[in-house]
Amino acid sequence: MATEAANSADASDAVIAFAARTAEAATTAAIARPADGLVTVRPKPEKRKNAKERAKEKFTRGGTTPMTAKAKSTVQETVSDKASDRAHDKAKVMAEKAKVKAQKADTKARKISAAKAAKAARAA
């Protein structure tokens, strides 16, 4: 019976020792291996991109996407249309302001002439 207890104790010690070795091996595997001799240890380089991938990355980096000639011309037409619309709207606003200004001046002139007429009627 004592030998069985000794054997089971040895077995449990062996299991514990094995678990310790595997845990130690796992931690050493996680650590980068040192350079042996003239070999330099470095991470695997990134895969080389083809022209399409490089162009996509270049244009999406700035937040814009590449445009075709047709798309550029459409955008330019839209911009020029917007600019001409703005100029037309500005001219409309300026004409409206001039009209209002003329009406105010006319009203003021009528008030002045009415005041003069009233003054002349009182004096007579």
Image: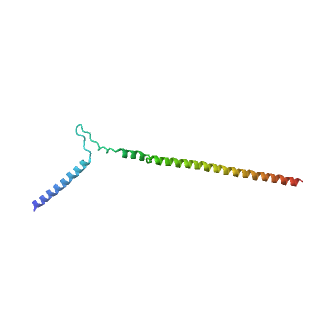
Residue sitting nearer the eye, 45 or 34: 45
Q: Which residue is drawn at 55% across and 49% down?
A: 81
Q: Estimate the x, y position of residue 22 in percent, counting from the top left.
A: 21, 52
Q: Estimate the x, y position of residue 109 in percent, counting from the top left.
A: 77, 51
Residue found at the very far top of the displayed protein: 38
Q: Which colour scheme is used?
A: rainbow
Left/right placement of residue 52 relative to residue 21 reads: right
Left/right placement of residue 20 relative to residue 108 reads: left
Residue found at the very far front of the displayed protein: 70
Residue sitting nearer the eye, 26 or 94: 94
Q: Place residue 54 in its image quadrant.
A: top left
Q: Residue at x 57, y 47 (%)?
A: 83
Q: Which residue is drawn at 58% across and 48% down?
A: 84
Q: Which residue is drawn at 69% across and 49% down?
A: 98
Residue found at the very far right of the displayed protein: 124
Left/right placement of residue 60 relative to residue 115 reads: left
Q: Quadrant of the C terminus?
A: bottom right
Q: Estimate the x, y position of residue 11 in percent, counting from the top left.
A: 14, 57
**Total residue callouts:** 0
Q: Quadrant of the N terminus?
A: bottom left
Left/right placement of residue 91 relative to residue 70 reads: right
